[in-house]
Amino acid sequence: MTKLFNLIIGGAAGTIARYVLAGAVYRFAGTSFPYGTLIVNVSGCFILGFLASLSDKKFILGPDARLLLMIGFCGAFTTFSTLIFESDNLLKNGQAIRAFTNIFASVILGFILFRAGSLLGEII
């Protein structure tokens, strides 16, 4: 029961955090490009990299914390399916360069920030 509770709490927190962060980014940057989803995805990669480092290298996070934070929170926080949906909409609207910029920026920045989070976790 504790495992399910951790997933539910982490998932709810991740969903709320995604909604709040993406909304703030869209209010600041506008909606001509899916900046909110991009920021959520790359920051989620950073957070997941950081948590993975704390778990795998520092052994600070136990199985319950991994479920809560890595699977529950990060799983609900990141929005890869939304990235694909929004990129497809850009493509359908004749904005191929923006669509592929969104995909490549999310993947490349996501990987770089995952590594940065992992490295930060190692030095703490």
Image (cartoon, rainbow, N blue to C red):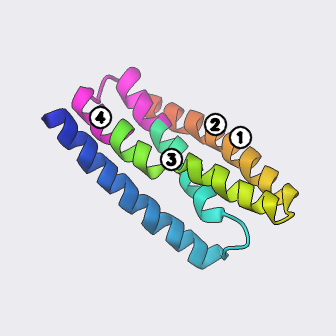
Earlier along the polypeptide chain: callout 3 or callout 4?
3
Q: Secondary structure at mark 3?
A: helix
Q: Give the residue at mark 2.
A: 111
Q: For mark 2, does the 10 Å Cα neighbourhood hold few (<14), some (14 to 19), or many (20 or more) residues?
A: some
In front of the other: 49 or 121: 49
Q: Give the residue at mark 1.
A: 108
Earlier along the polypeptide chain: callout 1 or callout 3?
3
In front of the other: 94 or 99: 94
C-alpha distance separating marks 1 and 2: 5 Å
Q: Would you identify the image quadrant in which residue 65 lies?
A: top left
Q: Nearer the viewer, mark 4 or mark 2?
A: 4
C-alpha distance separating marks 3 and 2: 10 Å
Q: Which mark is on residue 93?
A: none
**Part of the protein shown in magenta:** 49-70
Give me the residue at 76% from left, 45% from top.
Answer: 104
**Residue 63 visible:** yes
Q: For mark 4, does the 10 Å Cα neighbourhood hold few (<14), some (14 to 19), or many (20 or more) residues?
A: many
Q: Give how far across and how far down residue 68 sits, in percent.
A: 28, 40
Q: Give how far across and how far down residue 15 sits, in percent.
A: 39, 57
Q: Give the residue at mark 4.
A: 67
Q: Secondary structure at mark 4?
A: helix
Amino acid identity at mark 4: Leu
Q: Could you tell me if the residues under marks 1 and 2 are in contact, i.e. CB atoms within 8 Å?
A: yes
